[in-house]
Image (tube, rainbow, N blue to C red):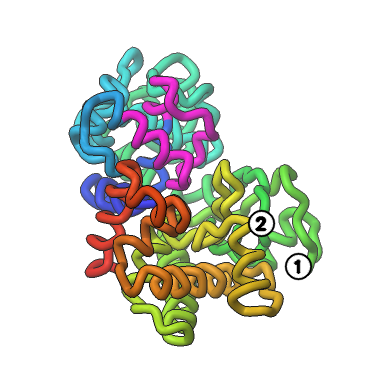
Amino acid sequence: MLIATAALCLAAAASADTSAYTAGLQVGLRSKGLYGGPIDGIAGPRTTAAVRRLQRRAGLAVDGVPGPRTRRALGRLGRPLLGRRVLAPGMRGLDVSVLQFYLRRRGHDPGRLDGHFGVRTRQALSAFQRRQRLAADGLAGRKVVAALRGRAPGRERARFTRYLVRRGDSLTAIATRFGTTVPALARANDLQQSRVLRESISLRIPSFRPGRAAAAATMTGAFAVRTAIDYWSQHYGVEERLARALAWMESGYQSHVVSEAGAEGVMQVTPPTWAFVEEVLLRSDVPHTTDGNIRVGVAFLAHLLRRFEGDERLALAAYYQGPKAVRDHGIFPVSRPYVANILALKSRV
């Protein structure tokens, strides 16, 4: 969904990585009773849906983008950005939530991620400062923020980050995400590199390098997804920019995303749609891989464009709400921002 684009803009403005600020946003949404998922920094459909609910409640434009007005609607947990002030015990805010997320990712337990600078957060911060050879005063100023965002020296490098395996994860995907290698990941967990991972097991992630992880995600994951989208778009006669924008809106090019409705992968394909594409449109089985997911989604988009005589707005609305609903009732109000956002994204992805 478009929250991924907004999170990227927010992170760039704050000189931080996307996942930390997405986690901070999730904390604020949870405090309002709008988000019940994990504080994991993943800008997926559940987070987007929570942003939309907040916007409806606050009387804002419902576009799923956590801009300044939307963040203000979160109250004290919607601002400021990390680095705008020196953080001290007793403070609350988005920046405290982001600080807590960074500390946990560095292996220091700040307690519940709630945007409140309490005793556990102070203890975790002091431990991080000692490890970084900084003054252990329990205050998060410019040097602490820089150390949290950068690659830690000395003993900090040898620490392990913990990661809970989710549905569809692989050693390759996890290694890419955390900026390490498959052999290092396998050695750290005494696993065979070819092993299929069991959901919900806890893995030790060695030598976490945020900078390398971000670069790998951009150069490997997103590039590979975009290449597959372009290939199948050409194959099925769909404008490449339209298919890319749809995929970015649906998943942010993330192949592991699973919605509450059971839609999966980069193109967020539901099981009934996958079956329809296989049985009616292609008349052949499609492997349940990232490439297969993209193929099915693009083939279905091509079908919708034909069905609605090339009208992109109607085809996109049908992808979101179903072709029968579009034919019988037109574009639902809830679908209009979705369609508009995808069309706006065409020039950016």
Q: Residue at x 55, y 63 (%)?
A: 176
Callout 2: 10 Å neighbours few (<14), some, many (20+)? some
Given contact means CB atoms under 8 Å apart, are the residues at marks 1 and 2 in contact? no
In the visual, does 289 lie left or right of 336?
right
Vertical arrangement, residue 300 with respect to residue 114, above or below: below
Vertical arrangement, residue 72 with respect to residue 325, above or below: above
Identify the residue under disc 1.
193
N-term mark: 1 or 2: 2
> In the figure, residue 31 lies in which quadrant?
top left
Secondary structure beneath dot 1 equals: loop
Q: Residue at x 34, y 73 (%)?
A: 309
Q: Residue at x 48, y 40 (%)?
A: 46
x, y (%) of residue 147?
36, 44
x, y (%) of residue 227?
45, 79
Magenta-highlighted residues: 27-54
Q: Nearer the viewer, residue 323 or 149?
A: 323
Vertical arrangement, residue 30 with respect to residue 161, above or below: above
Q: Residue at x 32, y 19 (%)?
A: 92
Residue 32, magenta (yes or no): yes
Q: What amino acid is found at the position of numbered circle 2 in the picture?
A: Gly
Identify the residue under disc 2.
168
x, y (%) of residue 5?
31, 54
